[in-house]
Amino acid sequence: MGWGFAFMDSPFHEITGAVTAPRGFRAAAIGCGIKEGGQAGRPRDDLALIVSDFPAVGAATFTTNKIKAAPVRVSMDHLRSAELRGIIANSGNANACTGADGIRCAKRMTAAAAGALGWNEKQFLVCSTGRIGRELPIERIEKAVPELAGKLHADNGRAVARAIMTSDTFEKEIAIELSLAGKPVRIGGVAKGAGMINPDMATMLCFVTTDAAIAKRDLQKLFLESVEQSFNRITVDGDMSTNDTAICLANGQSGAELLQPQSALYDAFAHGLHFVTRQLARMIVEDGEGVSKFVEVHVKNAATCRDARKAAEAVANSMLVKCSWCGEDPNWGRVMDAVGYAAINVREEMVDIFYNGVVAAEHGMASDTPPEKLKEILRNKNFTVTIDLHLGTAEYKVFTTDLTTDYVKFNLSE
Amino acid sequence: MGWGFAFMDSPFHEITGAVTAPRGFRAAAIGCGIKEGGQAGRPRDDLALIVSDFPAVGAATFTTNKIKAAPVRVSMDHLRSAELRGIIANSGNANACTGADGIRCAKRMTAAAAGALGWNEKQFLVCSTGRIGRELPIERIEKAVPELAGKLHADNGRAVARAIMTSDTFEKEIAIELSLAGKPVRIGGVAKGAGMINPDMATMLCFVTTDAAIAKRDLQKLFLESVEQSFNRITVDGDMSTNDTAICLANGQSGAELLQPQSALYDAFAHGLHFVTRQLARMIVEDGEGVSKFVEVHVKNAATCRDARKAAEAVANSMLVKCSWCGEDPNWGRVMDAVGYAAINVREEMVDIFYNGVVAAEHGMASDTPPEKLKEILRNKNFTVTIDLHLGTAEYKVFTTDLTTDYVKFNLSE
């Protein structure tokens, strides 16, 4: 992908198992008939459960959309619990714009999970994804939870990744093992994405588990940083969902010592966590609805960080820019245009634009690079567009996609 | 269109002639080889000239994009002239991102027009539209101007509309005649649009002429109001061009008395001017690249005017909302989602959403309206989406389109 995931020398390696790779975590998935379809009379998996057999601390970030789905509101409340036990999630219905009944349904999901396992409902977080504004079939969920709980197993991490898919075309999962002072520590994750992918909680859902031992507030700080440099850096269509949620649970079962901020072990763990979230973010963009190009937009030497970000996002979300990428047209004029309306400090005569480091525009004007050479670069599936504003030192990167006829076709209806 | 153009009782009627309908205006168009294509060895018209045979006062608004094309910068300067004589405009090349040479070329266009007619270059405004970042073939333009000036005629208003087209599929032109205290006063206009249509100067180019007598500063005030309620209310793809320009010239040749602000005649003229700009704006949306639906987004009872506008524009520019319109899916959840991320005051439980007045969501939740009834409305080519925030009294309307696979195809390259 050329996204700078150069972790070759890092003290960790990938393993299998996704969210159940870390010790003390089990998971299960089942079909209870919320999603349509299914084959041979068997419904598609649409309900997932992740539990920690030992009390865990939790960190999470949620959509900044002012219209928040019921499960988001309930999870924001339950996140205050000192000892969490798990996550229950469904796909096929977002339980958003469902009023007080929706809140009750989200709470009943946590109560069903807690009841089946003998824990407290406040120890469960809850997520939903799917169509907005439809009543959640809570009875089906409640009826399925005992069987779901009975299926909990340390081999089912990948099944969770599949059960939370909506228009995703492949499971997004990863796990790594780090060695912290000789102790193996694991981090696992699953995510779902596809449409409605925008900075500020780009993923629809992301669940990360770890058997590291870390204080709740340290985990919250670290996980926010991790989301900032991963999910908040990706965009497919500029829309932001009502349900976006990223959760990290840490249960300390690795046996490694409690991570202390500003220590080498803490930094190594952060390194691993960032790798996990960036890989999941990358998979979400790769699975953007109907996309054909994966583009890094890199704004550098902006006057302020805000300017760098605004410019990068204006370019990454411009329909015209995205169409020209799809058409493999090195149309840097559309890039300039988007930078110009981003409401930032920009001086036209200072702007340079590069495709994969090859100069397309210099001092705000066409460079001498032959157009054929630039077209060659845009024929790649992955490339970088760099915009040098020459006004300061701030920079920002966004990972995005082109806009294709398939994207439109996918989104004609739900 | 159902856009509320209810001017049946107005004291004016449509006439032919576009920008040359008002007395004292002549126009011409010619092909000088900037645009590619053409048939039977004859290049497509790509250079247009509008002149007033008598000194005219001028008003204009320009793109708010910080990257402004050279002709925009030159016209902003020349607009200060007390006595204007005309407009020279080319299509096929935007003369944007062309540096100091671009400025020189834009000035040479005005000098060529002025030279051919014996006037001063500062009396001409200049516009360009087309691809950004390519050197303007100024010699071709200069060579063609004498012939162009020789073709000036009061019958050529429509030819200007054709010569400024880029990806437009039809000429956008209109003219009306009003009776002001028994004197016939005419207003004519042409415009081009298609891609890059966004509020804050939505049109790429719009030229309005009138033989009314009006003071320069009154015309400027009135024309800004007129643009605000027309071109600034339309959006196709949310992108804003480097070249957007709307110009109004008034030469006083009707013989009607000088319009005095806050008089009945002034209001009648304003009424007519607003009609002309709204009709041109409507045509631009109707000719949006590859669109199939024309949608009025009406936000009402917002806490502030800013909120009403932000919400309407977030909905009108959401790729997911626009795709669902194309798919004739009454997906009010996507509308709620866009309202939620518009960074406005919104209380989910207060929001009602209507399609053509039929309630789709009430108190932030699905209404009892049968989905089939809502789908029926979305099968129309034109419909209104009303979002009632129930928080205040501010309202805002935007006119927009759906997002289609054809839009993407049109914009793969230029």
Image (cartoon, coloured by chain):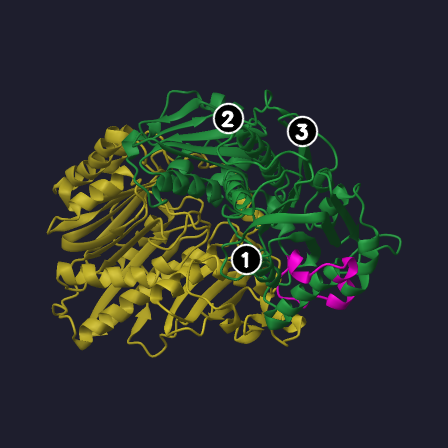
Chain colours: A green, B yellow
In front: mark 3 or mark 1? 3
Q: Can residue B106 be seen by looking at this rendering?
A: yes
Q: Are marks 3 and 2 on the same chain?
A: yes
Report the residue at 11% width, 51% height from top: B83
In front: mark 3 or mark 2? 3
- Residue A15 shown left or right of residue A272 in the figure: right
Q: Residues within 10 Å of mark 2 (few under 14, many from 20)?
A: some
- Where's residue B302, x and y in %? 40, 70
| Tag 3 residue | A183
Q: Nearer the viewer, residue B290 or A195?
A: A195
Report the residue at 81% width, 64% height from top: A143
Q: Residues within 10 Å of mark 1 (few under 14, many from 20)?
A: many
Q: Are marks 1 and 2 on the same chain?
A: no
- Where's residue A61, x and y in %? 54, 50
- Where's residue A363, x and y in %? 31, 27
- Residue B193 shown left or right of residue A134 in the figure: left
